[in-house]
Amino acid sequence: MFSKDEVRALVAREDFDGLLRLFDADADRVRRFLTRLTYAPGTREHAAAIRCFERLCACRSGGAEEFFRETMRRHIWAMNEEGANVAWSAPEIICAIIAGNPAAYGAFFSYAFEAAVDEPTFQPSLLAGCEMVARAAPELVRGREEEIARLAAAVRERGA
């Protein structure tokens, strides 16, 4: 069994091989700890955890397709939850998984986009996610450029 501190240390060093070993031992535990690391907006830890989601998907989605689908579903559901726990980084996590394997998960982009675009809480994360997806699979964001530009302007105006 490994601890959240072990995951945090691997993420801080961006030790993807070490993280892959832990993922192979207990993928759910890694998902839970990585998600927690995304809760600190604007930090190096947050950005590194997002990159880890992308890398894990790129390296393991071939044998864990349903795991990554379930992860995206959980985050889409969390964005629609009316409880006090706001999963503000959910769009970015979903987009990191999409960027990790656009061929397998690209269809989820529209769900993440539509769930987040009208909610100011999720918009900064959605913008960061759109950038990742655009780098990995530009065709997935094609046709949404004007909407993304308006969204970016609104986020800048709010100072988010």
Image (spheres, rainbow, N blue to C red):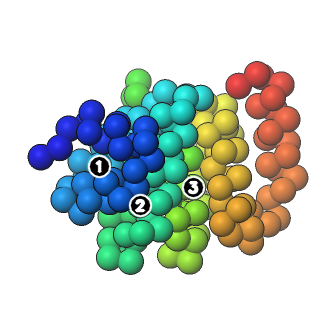
Label 3 Cα neighbours within 10 Å, binned few <14 / some 14-19 / many ≥20: many
Q: CA distance from mark 1 to mark 2?
A: 10 Å
Question: Residue 3 in the image: x percent, y percent?
Answer: 20, 38
Horizontal relation, residue 104 to residue 144: left or right = left
Q: Residue flagged by tag 2: what amino acid is it? A: Leu
On the question of residue 57 being in view, the answer is yes
For image coordinates 40% across by 50% down, the residue present is 15
Q: CA distance from mark 3 to mark 1?
A: 18 Å
Label 2 Cα neighbours within 10 Å, binned few <14 / some 14-19 / many ≥20: many
On the question of residue 89 being in view, the answer is no
Q: Which mark is residue 46?
A: none
Residue 152 quadrant: top right
Dots 1 and 2: beta carbons under 8 Å? yes
Q: Residue flagged by tag 1: what amino acid is it? A: Val
Q: Which residue is mark 3?
A: 95
Foreground: 102 or 16? 16
Q: Does label 1 or label 2 sit earlier along the sequence?
A: 1
For image coordinates 58% across by 71% down, the residue present is 102
Horizontal relation, residue 99 to residue 38: left or right = right
Q: Which residue is mark 2?
A: 56
Q: CA distance from mark 3 to mark 2?
A: 13 Å
Q: State which mark lies toward you, 3 or 2.
A: 2
Q: Which residue is mark 1?
A: 30
Q: Residue flagged by tag 3: what amino acid is it? A: Cys
Residue 137 quadrant: bottom right
Above or below: residue 105 compared with residue 123 = below
The residue tagged with tag 1: helix, strand or loop?
Answer: helix
